[in-house]
């Protein structure tokens, strides 16, 4: 892996994730009465649990509002949950202030253009493997895995490996 990426990863203490297209595969499921359904990958969940167990923190910034996201985030111990935030830059600034971290201590993983707007602000910008091409071009790193298919776990494994080798 590129030394620049490893250097950036070594500074990360807060992982911020988009939800739809990152923690899920990006598809939106609706039941017959309009209820929204989402599918999360268990390995991403285990990665987040491992990240927290290592003493690090996480957050979600999502453009949509969903009680399912809130529930899953609480199950995983995600500390910062900002939903309904289509303009993600202000949410990012609010989150890092609440967390008491600097922008270079943040990894942000996303899949679509609103996420890429945050990329220049963070220490490590990551696009999932099936992200929009413009998002991949703006990222420091692109995962091999697609959103909702283990991309978050892939990133966390990299972050934790860098921390262990330091």
Image: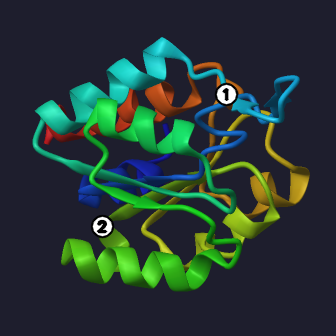
Residue tagged by mark 2?
A: 105
Element class at badge 2: helix
Element class at badge 1: loop
Q: Position of residue 155 (x, y in %)?
A: 46, 35
| Marks 1, 2: nearer the viewer | 1
Asked whether 66 or 43 is in front, the reply is 66
Residue at the location (60% across, 57% down)? 140
Local packing at callout 1 (Cα closer than 10 Å; few below 14, some 14-19, many 20+) is some
Residue at the location (46% across, 24% down)? 44
Q: Which mark is residue 28?
A: none
The quadrant of the picture occupied by the C terminus is: top left
Q: Position of residue 147 (x, y in %)?
A: 68, 31
Q: Earlier in the sequence, mark 1 or mark 2?
A: 1
In terms of image quadrants, where is residue 21?
top right
Residue tagged by mark 1?
A: 38
In the displayed structure image, the side of residue 102 where residue 55 appears, left or right: left
The number of numbered discs placed on residues in the rendered structure image is: 2
């Amino acid at each position: 892996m590129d030394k620049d990426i490893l250097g950036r990863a070594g500074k990360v203490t807060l992982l911020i994730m988009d939800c739809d297209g990152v923690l899920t595969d990006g598809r939106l499921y609706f039941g017959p009465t309009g209820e929204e359904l989402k599918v999360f990958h268990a390995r991403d969940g285990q990665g987040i649990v491992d990240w927290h167990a290592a003493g690090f923190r996480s957050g979600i910034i999502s453009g949509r509002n969903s009680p399912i996201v809130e529930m899953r985030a609480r199950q995983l111990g995600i500390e910062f949950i900002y939903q309904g935030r289509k303009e993600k830059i202000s949410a990012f600034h609010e989150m890092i202030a609440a967390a008491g971290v600097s922008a270079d201590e943040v990894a942000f993983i996303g899949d679509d253009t609103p996420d890429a707007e945050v990329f220049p602000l963070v220490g490590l910008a990551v696009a999932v493997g099936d992200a929009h091409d413009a998002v991949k071009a703006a990222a420091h790193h692109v995962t091999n895995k697609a959103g909702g298919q283990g991309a978050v776990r892939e990133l966390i494994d990299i972050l934790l490996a860098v921390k262990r080798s330091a």
